[in-house]
């Protein structure tokens, strides 16, 4: 079957079997390997992408049903090759990752939270990432990263220096 | 390194972990990201039976499916490859990647289907008909230990993989003389570290180059050695690529059966073959489960709570095959008395086969279960004597002036100040406030308990448990290497010779080299050559890399400095002793003459006429570093120096339980941590926090549970419960530094921190909370339902109208 | 974990969807996919055809109807969670929604999907059972409905006829009065299905006498269970703590509970009573805060 997917601002037309997941389509057909497979049954969140701006599990979405949405993967977050967003940089500052496997999902979850809430509490951050499992960090430095990014975005907006969140 | 805090320019300072940068952008290079042209894909057919003879495999229908290349069974595989290596001396316990003749656990890989895509391979495997003749099975380790039990491996003749009893010191005399004794049993449930990435591997055999390339999410020493041996090819025909990011491992990603299977398939089919374990294959048959252990402990102690002697019997349910896992009974010998001055120890280590999945090395290699057993004992001694649990620990702790401290089993602990760490933690936790908080919660009708745990993290690694538990093994080398090259323009690169799974080894190596050379670590590139181009390494196991990679990099950098000084000395016409290396320049100690970095590089690379005799052109140095306290075989009575360094941690936890619900909630968590000099504080903290999360899972949530039919119940993430951000509380870390005298910067290994003590601390808290009801918990995991039922049972018994039995 | 091969169809109407189901006994409907796709991945579900109804217009939406509320089957959990209409008309459902999975599941999963799947430990079926909702569905003969107490037969087995499509759920308007609700759940982890959960709604008159009460237990047995005996015990009474406690324990006394890896049958039964009592108390407290004649 043919399906047209709008991924990171570009429209792609793919020929896929109906059973192919969006996760596999992104990784194999589009070579976007930043989205990861952890369980393929919707629990771990390593496959998180944004669908119309909402965090969603790519392993629970069939590619043939993913037309008509704006899909964003982790590859869309960095403003340019070699540059990091404020949130990504905050993860580097607090060491909010170790192996990096769950990290794209965590960053997308944090990204969405910060768009909805510029001053999240610690509890709000914990809730926002509760669907993303991590085995390396124990979550502490991840929460620190998202809170740090929130602080920097608020300061940045206050100073009106621009820059993409 | 002697006492006193050393001042470092880069070591111990805040520094971003350079690996993070590409990983936050989604530009990791994980094994599954590789898509080689023409790659074929594997799906495994697994046994439904816990024990069964494999009568026949009929793959006709599967092979007829378009896109299916091959269906391989164990018999064919065993004819072409050698069995995988075992740790203990059990040659008749043979293990191959696929079951041969007999399936020995539910989930064991019986056949491999190779097809053009994973989907087609899964379609085809449903068409393969395997006929089984079920056999009797056993999952119980005590039953397996009985001499008349049916052996899982008939030729081996019994279920015993390992049965060694050690006596260090006059245990009987100490027990006879002691005023008090107590005995208890604890049970560490079968859990594991379960990384989010399963095991992924691509192997490509090139018949023209006679080379097997391997890209794998592996964390394993001697990986290429064992692949080569099993495939019966020279080791230098196996090229393992180390520039692969591994998505977490914490011990378990050995992948040796995966590699031999896929390597063989690639050779057979002359095509790249990729195996990406799915979660079901991983949980059931990935051979990544951890210790499954019963401890029976006796303690002999005095009126003041000082423990004189300990007897410990550790019975481990190894599962259906041996592998390296039985050694997880041996490594804890290196810290068998924990942080305490116990005079004599009798240790009986038993590993048996049953029809459960085989174990693999799990973070700590047996130390976390052993710490749980020891700390339970301390709590019981305090309870028996009516003494404060903190005070009993303080009385038993090795004191700071006793280091290096020799424990009965032959290891010398390098350094520590346990009392100081405890004091710091109690201050940070506001100990009186914490007690008041607990008591306030109790007054409000809740159950509340404070948990304590003190334990050691042996680090630096070594293989000493191998010759200890298998006299046929005489390995005493457990080295690590680093190579530094300064190129013709003066840029510096250092090589690391293993894969990493998030530990920040690039940053570690660059920091160590930068420290010695006085160069900003961010200007040093770190490279990962493949296994053939690499020097010797033993991979990140045994909490060793800070010590060993740090040491190798340090010494390599030192060699570089020596060369540069020699070049300068020759060119300045002075003795080397009159010169000093200072941040890239070599200058006279008393005098103004100097040679700068550029000039030194130019001489080394281009000006042979200015090079001193005996110094090779170019600037490339390497160092292979041996374990600082290693190099000896065990004594006849089983004493040996296990690991060189001993980090210390002390946990304080406040747990609250609604007695009507039984679900423990961790309200406060403070940990004191002393791993000597921290090379990178953020990395160390990350390890500790992640380790605590693993420990929470092992204590409360995670278990590879089996039912009465020999089937694993927890086969997916629906039933194997990993802690989410909601289940891990905010943790306060308190640092202390007692440098190790044996390592280059005073650093100690710290890759297992948090995990080694958290289960003991949480158990301690829950038992403190429920002790007044006359109940206790001695089995991990402690599920909320069991806690709730035990509380309800105790309240029922305590009712005046009910059975008037009070403990 | 790749699914079996299947065909895919995206009909534009419910009637067309039902026709596809009628033509192939192994066809399956898919809406949010959060439940079905894991089953496809594990090959527990092996359809020949997936009939995608997610974008059928008439299936989506939250509408006031006959002073009650009707929610279309493909309405996503997150839409229900944030809906002012749901908060107004079915506050118990709004109360339960944060317990459904976690944000990413709620972004895609649908009310209809949860209802049609019928996991005994799921929150949405529990609320529907507790409030005596009406299941709306359609087959070749046209639109129909079924009271929820006939709908759940066994774990993940419903009375939805073959070749029928669940189209929505209708919550009737409650009796007038001061309303409050309560929801409690015990699970191993925050976002898991319930080990046991209790939902309750209470309506009081101006003198705090109970006019109506509904309560249900999820996760305990084969299906969510409505505690019918509570009405008799509590209507016409003042809802003191003691009265609520006794009524909750009595209502749960005959509950059949399940034993599994996560909890014993004894645990579920005992804690069902505890949670029912707590949910009722919360509902009563909330109702007492509500001013007379208007919903809180």
Image: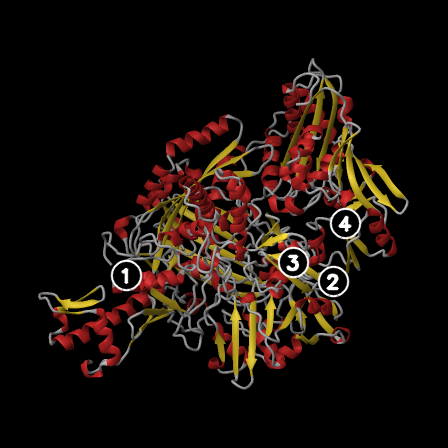
Q: Residue A39 or B782: which is nearer the viewer?
A: A39
Label placed on residue B515: 1
Q: Residue C175 or C268: which is nearer the viewer?
A: C175
| Label 4 SS | loop
Number of marks: 4
Q: Which mark's residue is nearer the viewer, 2 or 4? A: 4
Marks 3/2: CA distance?
Answer: 23 Å
Q: What x and y, as percent, mark residue B504?
A: 41, 59
Name the image quarter holding residue B32: bottom right
Marks 2/4: CA distance?
Answer: 20 Å
Q: Which residue is mark 2?
A: C4
Residue at the extreme right: C141
| Label 2 SS | loop
Marks 4/3: CA distance?
Answer: 19 Å
Chain ID at mark 1 = B
Check contact, mark 3 vs mark 2: CB within 8 A.
no
Name the image quarter holding residue C266: top right
Is residue C80 placed above or below B582 in the rendered structure?
A: above
Q: Residue B111 or B583: which is nearer the viewer?
A: B583
Task: Note whether residue B350 is visible.
Answer: yes
Q: Which residue is mark 3?
A: A5
Query: Who's the residue at 85% across and 48% down the image?
Result: C15
Q: Which residue is mark 4?
A: C53
Q: Which mark's residue is nearer the viewer, 4 or 1? A: 4
Query: Who's the residue at 56% across and 31% down the image?
Result: B806
Chain ID at mark 4 = C
Chain ID at mark 3 = A
Check contact, mark 4 vs mark 1: CB within 8 A.
no
Q: What x and y, as percent, mark residue B600?
A: 21, 73
Classify mark 2: residues with Cα within 10 Å, few (<14), some (14-19) or many (20+).
Answer: many
């Amino acid at each position: 079957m043919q399906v047209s997917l709008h991924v990171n601002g570009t429209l792609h037309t793919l020929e896929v079997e109906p059973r192919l997941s969006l996760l596999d389509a992104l990784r194999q057909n589009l070579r976007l390997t930043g989205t990861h497979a952890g369980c393929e049954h919707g629990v771990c969140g390593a496959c998180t992408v944004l669908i119309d701006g909402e965090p969603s599990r790519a392993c629970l979405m069939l590619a043939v049903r993913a037309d008509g949405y704006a899909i964003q993967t982790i590859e869309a977050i960095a403003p340019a090759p070699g540059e990091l967003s404020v949130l990504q940089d905050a993860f580097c500052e607090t060491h909010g990752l170790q192996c990096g496997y769950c990290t794209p999902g965590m960053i997308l979850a944090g990204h969405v939270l910060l768009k909805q809430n510029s001053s999240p509490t610690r509890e709000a951050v914990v809730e926002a990432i509760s669907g993303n499992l991590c085995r390396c960090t124990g979550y502490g430095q991840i929460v620190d990263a998202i809170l740090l990014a929130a602080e920097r975005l608020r300061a940045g907006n206050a100073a009106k220096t621009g820059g993409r969140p | 390194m002697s006492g006193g805090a050393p001042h470092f320019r880069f070591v111990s300072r805040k520094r971003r972990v350079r690996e993070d940068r590409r990983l936050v952008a989604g530009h990791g290079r994980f094994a599954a990201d590789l898509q080689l042209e023409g790659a074929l894909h594997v799906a495994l057919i697994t046994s439904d039976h816990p024990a069964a003879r494999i009568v026949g495999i009929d793959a006709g229908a599967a092979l007829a499916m378009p896109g299916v290349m091959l269906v391989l069974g164990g018999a064919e595989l065993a004819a072409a490859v050698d069995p995988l290596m075992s740790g203990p001396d059990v040659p008749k316990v043979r293990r191959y990647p696929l079951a041969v003749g007999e399936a020995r656990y539910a989930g064991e890989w019986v056949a491999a289907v190779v097809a053009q895509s994973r989907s087609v391979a899964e379609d085809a495997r449903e068409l393969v008909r395997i006929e089984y003749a079920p056999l009797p099975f056993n999952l119980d380790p005590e039953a397996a230990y009985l001499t008349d039990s049916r052996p899982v491996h008939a030729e081996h003749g019994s279920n015993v993989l390992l049965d060694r009893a050690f006596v260090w010191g006059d245990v009987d005399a100490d027990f006879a003389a002691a005023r008090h004794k107590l005995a208890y049993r604890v049970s560490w449930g079968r859990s594991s570290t379960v990384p989010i990435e399963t095991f992924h591997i691509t192997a490509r055999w090139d018949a023209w180059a006679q080379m097997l390339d391997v890209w794998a999410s592996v964390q394993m020493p001697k990986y290429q050695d064992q692949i080569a041996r099993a495939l019966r090819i020279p080791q230098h025909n196996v090229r393992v690529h180390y520039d692969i990011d591994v998505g977490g491992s914490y011990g378990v990603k050995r992948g040796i059966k995966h590699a031999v299977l896929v390597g063989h398939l690639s050779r057979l089919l002359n095509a790249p073959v990729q195996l990406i374990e799915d979660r079901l294959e991983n949980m059931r048959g990935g051979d990544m489960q951890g210790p499954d252990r019963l401890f029976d402990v006796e303690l002999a102690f005095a009126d003041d709570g000082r423990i004189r002697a300990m007897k410990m019997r550790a019975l481990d349910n190894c599962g259906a095959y041996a592998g390296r896992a039985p050694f997880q009974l041996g490594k804890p010998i290196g810290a068998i008395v924990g942080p305490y001055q116990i005079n004599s120890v009798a240790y009986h280590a038993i590993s048996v086969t049953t029809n459960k999945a085989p174990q693999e090395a799990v973070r700590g290699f047996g130390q976390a279960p052993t710490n749980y057993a020891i700390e339970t004992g301390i709590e019981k001694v305090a309870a028996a004597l009516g003494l404060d649990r903190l005070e009993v620990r303080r009385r038993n702790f090795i004191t700071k002036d006793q280091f290096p401290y020799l424990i009965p089993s032959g290891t010398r602990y390098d350094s520590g100040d346990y009392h100081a760490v405890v004091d710091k933690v109690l201050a940070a936790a506001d100990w009186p406030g914490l007690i008041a908080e607990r008591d306030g919660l109790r007054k409000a009708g809740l159950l509340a308990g404070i948990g304590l745990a003190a334990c050691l993290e042996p680090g630096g690694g070594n293989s000493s448990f191998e010759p200890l538990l298998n006299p046929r093994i005489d390995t005493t080398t457990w080295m690590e290497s680093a190579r530094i090259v300064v190129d013709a323009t003066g840029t510096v690169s250092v090589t690391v010779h293993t894969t990493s799974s998030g530990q920040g080894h690039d940053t570690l190596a660059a920091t160590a080299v930068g420290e010695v050379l006085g160069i900003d670590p961010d200007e040093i590139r770190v490279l990962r050559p493949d296994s053939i181009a690499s020097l010797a390494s033993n991979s990140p196991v045994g909490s060793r890399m800070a010590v060993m990679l740090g040491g190798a990099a340090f010494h390599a950098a030192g060699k570089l400095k020596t060369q540069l000084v020699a070049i300068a000395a020759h060119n300045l016409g002075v003795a080397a002793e009159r010169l000093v290396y200072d941040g890239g320049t070599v200058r006279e100690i008393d005098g103004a003459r100097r040679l700068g970095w550029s000039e030194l590089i130019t001489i080394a690379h281009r000006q042979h006429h200015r090079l001193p005799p005996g110094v090779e052109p170019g600037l490339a140095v390497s160092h292979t570093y041996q374990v600082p306290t290693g190099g000896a075989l065990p004594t006849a009575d089983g004493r040996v120096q296990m690991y060189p360094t001993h980090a210390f941690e002390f946990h304080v936890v406040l747990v609250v339980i609604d007695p009507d619900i039984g679900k423990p909630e961790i309200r406060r968590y403070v940990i004191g941590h002393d791993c000597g000099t921290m090379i990178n504080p953020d990395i160390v903290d990350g390890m500790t926090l992640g380790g605590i999360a693993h420990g929470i899972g092992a204590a409360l949530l995670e278990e590879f549970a089996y039912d009465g039919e020999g089937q694993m119940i927890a086969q997916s993430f629906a039933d194997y419960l990993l802690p989410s951000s909601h289940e891990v509380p905010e943790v306060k870390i308190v640092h202390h530094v007692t440098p190790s005298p044996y390592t280059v910067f005073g650093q100690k290994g710290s890759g297992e921190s948090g995990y080694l003590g958290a289960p003991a601390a949480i158990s301690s808290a829950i038992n403190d909370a429920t002790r007044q009801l006359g109940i206790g918990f001695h089995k991990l995991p402690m599920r909320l339902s069991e806690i709730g039922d035990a509380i309800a049972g105790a309240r029922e018994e305590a009712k005046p109208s009910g059975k008037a039995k009070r403990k | 974990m790749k699914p079996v091969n299947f065909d895919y169809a995206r009909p534009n109407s419910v009637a067309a969807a039902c026709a596809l189901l009628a033509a192939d006994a192994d066809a399956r409907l898919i809406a949010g996919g959060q439940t079905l796709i894991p089953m496809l991945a594990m090959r527990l579900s092996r359809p020949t055809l997936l009939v995608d109804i997610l974008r059928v217009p008439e299936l989506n939406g939250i509408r006031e109807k006959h002073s009650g509320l009707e929610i279309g089957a493909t309405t996503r959990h997150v839409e229900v969670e944030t809906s002012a209409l749901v908060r107004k008309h079915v506050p118990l459902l709004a109360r339960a929604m944060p317990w459904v999975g976690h944000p990413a599941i709620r972004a895609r999963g649908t009310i209809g999907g949860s209802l049609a799947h019928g996991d005994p430990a799921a929150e949405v079926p529990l609320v529907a059972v507790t409030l005596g909702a009406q299941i709306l569905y359609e087959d070749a003969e046209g639109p129909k409905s079924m009271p929820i107490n006939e709908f759940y037969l066994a774990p993940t087995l419903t009375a939805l006829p073959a070749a029928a499509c669940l189209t929505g759920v209708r919550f009737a308007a409650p009796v007038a009065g001061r309303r409050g609700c309560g929801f409690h759940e015990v699970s191993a982890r925050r976002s898991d299905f319930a080990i046991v959960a209790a939902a309750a709604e209470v309506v009081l008159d101006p003198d705090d006498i109970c006019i109506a009460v509904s309560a249900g237990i999820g996760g305990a047995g084969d299906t969510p269970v409505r505690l019918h005996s509570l009405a008799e015990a509590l209507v016409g009474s003042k809802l003191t703590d003691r009265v609520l406690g006794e009524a909750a324990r009595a209502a749960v006394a005959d509950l059949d509970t399940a034993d599994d890896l996560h909890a014993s049958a004894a645990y579920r039964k005992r804690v069902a009573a505890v949670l029912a009592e707590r949910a009722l108390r919360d509902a009563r407290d909330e109702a007492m805060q509500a001013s007379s004649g208007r919903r809180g």
